[in-house]
Structure formats: C-alpha cells, structure tokens
Image (cartoon, coloured by chain):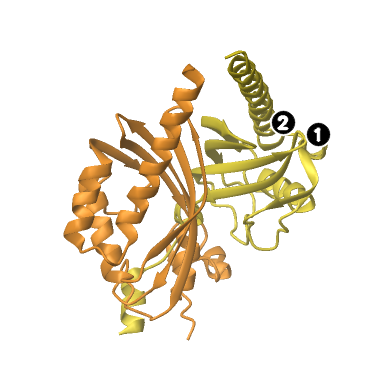
Amino acid sequence: MAERSGSDLQALNKRIATQAVAAQCSDAFAPTDVERSIDQFFAKDFVVHETFPGLARDSVGTKQWNALIHEAVPDYNVTIEDQLAENDKVVTRWTARGTHKGKFQGIAPTGRQVSVTGMTISRFVDGKIAESWIELDTLSLMRQLGADPSRDNRRLQERGTGGVTFNITINE
Amino acid sequence: MADLNVADRNSTVQNVRNKNVQEQNISVVRQVFANVCNSNDLESAHQAINEYFAEDFRVNRTPPGITPTIAGTKRWKGKVMDAFPDYHTEIEDQFADGDRVVIRWRSSGTHLGEFQGIAPTGRKITVSGITISRFADGKIAESWVGFDTQDLMRQLGVVVDQDILCSKHR
C-alpha cells in the first residue's frame, strides 16, 4: 500500500513539473501570469543550480529569466520528451523552440528559429519545487544564433595559456 | 475478495521485481562511472564498455568528430584521458524509473593535453551534467547527456565576447 501511495505522489509531482513548464512557456500568458505561476509552483526558498550568468539562483532570478525569454523569444515553447520520477525528484528531458525576435544575452535579434535540448531535475517539498538542477548546451544555442566561440582554435593556441581570446564567427 | 488478494499479491511481486531490476540497472551505471569514466587504463575501460553497453548503443549528442556509438564512446574515453590525465567524475545523485536511470554528475580534471583543438592550458576544470540511460536486457541501449559545453569552453579560456557580437549585428 505504501508503494502505491509513493507512486501516486510521484505522478502528482510529474504533473506539477509539467504544469510549471506549461505555465512558463505559453505565449498566451502575460509576464504577470508567469510571475504568479512561479509563486504557485515554486517554494518560497527555491534554489536553482547552473543558471545563466547574472541571474540570481532563486525565484526572483527565475522570474527575471522568464521575462528575458519572453522578450527574446516571444513564441518560446517547450516539448517534454521524457519524464521520470523517484521519491521526491522528477527529471524532465525537454526541447525548447522559438524564434529569436528580441535581444538575448547581448545578441541583437536574428529572426532565426532556435531549438535546444536539456534536462531539469526538480526536488519537491509539499507539492512545490524546492530545488532544480538544469543542464542545457548554451554553446549549441549560441552557435544557432551565429556565435561560435570554439571554431577558431588556432588563434587560441597562438595566444598560449595566458589571456582570454574571443573567437567569433558570424554566419550570414 | 480472494481474487483481490491475489491481484494485490501479484502487483506486489511485480513491484519487487521491478525494484530489483532498477537496483541492478543503477549498479551497472555506477560500474560504468567506476570502470569506464574513472579508469586510468584504456584497454580495461574499452572492455568495460563492451560489457555494459548494448551493441547498437546510441547517445543523443557527441562532441564534433565522435560517432554516437560504442566505437565513438571508446574513442572519446581515449581523448579525455589524453587531455585530462587526472580526470575524475563524482556521482552526486541517482535514481531509477522504469527502464531508465538518471545520474547527476560532476567531473573535474587538469587540461594537460590537446583537447578538441585547444592546446593544453594547465587549467583545472569542473563541469556538471545529467545523464539518462535506458536499459534493454541488462545493458545500456541509449543515453541522453545534458551538459553545458560553453561552461567548459569558458573554463578553458574560450569565451564569446557579447560586445563584439552586438556591434557586428548593429
């Protein structure tokens, strides 16, 4: 019996994780609705690991991130590819897609369609997400936006180990 | 009533059986981390890959020039050993659901050999990631790896200058 109630809880956590994704990525929602949904699905002391540089690792940073995404990629949407749960954790494997129509991480709008895959592990406490670990390949995203920091490796070798080298290729 | 009890008992037996398979799958993944990722011996790492992975194994993403197969996995192991001789991966979290196992990991090492065209920098790097492995007949048939290549590149001194990007696009 304990086994069954455990799997019920996991199913519920999966559902909440899905709703949290849906609420954040629907372009039908105004940013204020997204803010409200973050308060609804995330615990007050929510912590996120491995976020984008310059963003706080809490629900405030998550709200900022959502505002940035909605501005940069107004048609942003996420497909859930797979979802697994055990005890208090849910892992979601997802693909995010959209059109780059606003400034993103310093890159002016390119009008390009972008698609990135990633994974999120969410830890639940009392039906809310208390902690998340997010892994996505931002290099793949930057490449799709026309920036490639790793293509011109020869220049890096010439510079040696000392300084930081900017290797940028803009694909027209 | 008797029927219900039989059904309940059967479902409990099935649950226990599933749990055992999941524990076995987790144990295989832990052996991969110990005997492949953290092995200092290329030949024994290759043998371990043959043992734990299905012949038609596929992975969702690979570095440039690496095939998403057993052969690619072996080749990649050799490249990582050459580039980061002290490479080590820690398992930070693990769980199983159905035929899949999730591992959250953290790898570190010192960049002492050529890596993907980048000459040795002597820098210490640490990257984190998540790997989902799907099992078929006790072997890993498919993997999905989530990790941030840009974070690794930044630590190796390769970064995108966003000001340059902006001015180019203006």
Badge 2 and badge 1 both on one subunit: yes
Q: Residue furthest left?
A: A32
Q: Regarding mark 2 in the picture, which secondary structure is present there?
A: helix
The C terminus of chain B lies in which quarter of the figure?
bottom left
Q: Amino acid at mark 1?
A: Ser
Classify mark 1: residues with Cα within 10 Å, few (<14), some (14-19) or many (20+). Answer: few
Q: Which chain is yellow?
A: B
Q: Is residue B79 visible?
A: yes
Q: Which chain is orange?
A: A
Instruction: Give the x, y percent position of residue B30.
Output: 64, 29
Q: Does the CB distance between marks 2 and 1 fall below 8 Å?
A: yes
Please give the label number shown on residue B35.
2
Instruction: Give the x, y percent position of residue B113.
Output: 64, 50
Instruction: Give the x, y percent position of residue A40.
Output: 23, 44
Q: Residue furthest front?
A: B1
Reply above or below: A49 against B91: below
Q: Residue sitting at 63 percent across and 18 percent down?
A: B3
Q: Residue sitting at 27 percent across and 58 percent down?
A: A66
Task: Name the residue nearer the viewer: A165 or A79.
Answer: A79
The N terminus of chain B lies in which quarter of the figure?
top right
Task: Name the residue nearer the viewer: A122 or A84.
Answer: A84
Chain that bears disc 2: B
Figure label count: 2
Q: Does label 2 or label 1 sit earlier along the sequence?
A: 2
Task: Name the residue nearer the viewer: A31 or A111.
Answer: A31
Q: Amino acid at mark 2?
A: Asn
What is the spatial separation of the Cα atoms under label 2 and label 1, in whole angstroms? Answer: 8 Å
Q: Is residue B127 left or right of residue B26?
A: left
Q: Is residue B62 left or right of residue A76?
A: right
Q: Is residue A113 left or right of residue A104?
A: right
Residue denoted by label 1:
B44
Reply above or below: A113 against A25: below
